Structures are given as structure tokens and as C-alpha cells.
Amino acid sequence: MVTVPRPGPVSLATGSRVCVLLGLHLLTVAAYLYWVPTGTTPLPDGFPAGCGSAANPPSQALGRAVCGVANDVHRSRAALAAVGGSVVLIVVGPALLGVRRRGDRSPSAG
């Protein structure tokens, strides 16, 4: 009578784990770009104009005029890092590199 070994639990392959870790890192970078302030831009008379962040752009006309599209650039970078990088790495990486079963060894000939 031949017994078929039961497969072990499923885990991510090494390449899939690396993709997930890189994707989580890019997600952290996207959060940083979205919530960290863009900076302050000094005006010619020395008055700093706060540019806010991509999540909270300046509400005053002076801040919008001085900062220009800086917050839009940070919002675009955050979206690109989040969607273009992290989601692709976290979803597509394991889909392409696959999973492995622990304890599933092929019998050696001999």
C-alpha cells in the first residue's frame, strides 16, 4: 500500500517575501511623502510661508501663491509610490514568484 504524504502548511517563497518587504517599505515612503510638510518657503522680506503638506495644503491665498504646485507634486509622488510601487510589489510579486509548502520534500531516488 502506497501512502501519499500530506502537504505541509503553505508559506511565501523567499522572493515573494522580499517583494512584500520592499512593498511595505514603499508604502512607508508614500505615507512619508503624503503627511510630512512640504517645507517653508522664505519670502523676499524674510516672512516664511508655510506650504503645509499634501494631506493638508495651505488654506491661505499667500501660501497657495508661494508654494505653487509643490503639494501637488508630493501628492503625485505619494500616489506613485503607493500604487505604482507597493501594491504592484505586494500583489504581483508573490503571484509571480509563488508559494512553497513546508515539509513537502520530493523523495530521493535510490
Image: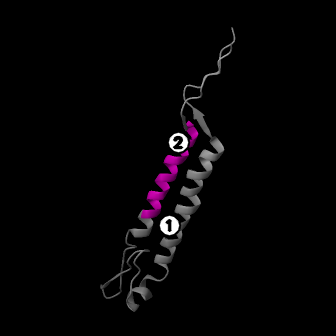
Magenta stretch holds residue 23? yes
Residue span colored magenta:
12-31
Magenta stretch holds residue 66? no
Kindly report which numbered mark, 2 or 1, lies closer to the viewer in this rendering.
2
State which quarter of the image contains the C terminus: top right
Can you give x and y, in whole percent of width and height, for residue 1 in the image? 68, 13
First in sequence: mark 2 vs mark 1: 2
Q: Please tell me which residue lies in front, 41 or 61.
A: 61
Left or right of 46 in this view: 68: right
Question: Which residue lies at the image location 56% right of the left edge and 57% below the top edge?
Answer: 87
Q: Which mark is residue 98?
A: none
Which residue is most to the top? 110
Residue under label 1 = 78
Question: Which residue lies at the image location 57% right of the left edge and 42% below the top edge?
Answer: 16
Left or right of 47 in this view: 14: right
Categorize mark 2 by other alpha carbons within 10 Å: few (<14), some (14-19), many (20+).
some
Q: Please tell me which residue lies in front, 69 or 90.
A: 90
Can you give x and y, in whole percent of width and height, for residue 62 in the image? 38, 90
Q: Main secondary structure of the magenta part?
A: helix
Can you give x and y, in whole percent of width and height, for residue 68 in the image? 47, 83
Mark 2 falls on what kind of element?
Answer: helix
Residue under label 2 = 17
Mark 1 falls on what kind of element?
Answer: helix
Can you give x and y, in whole percent of width and height, for residue 101 in the image? 58, 32
Seen in the picture, residue 38 relative to 105 is either above or below; the reply is below
Question: Which residue lies at the image location 39% right of the left edge and 83% below the top edge?
Answer: 58
Separation of disc 2 and disc 1 at Cα?
23 Å
Q: Please tell me which residue lies in front, 63 or 1.
A: 1
Q: Amino acid at mark 2?
A: Arg
Which residue is most to the front? 1
Q: Are marks 2 and 1 in contact (CB under 8 Å)?
A: no
Left or right of 93 in this view: 38: left
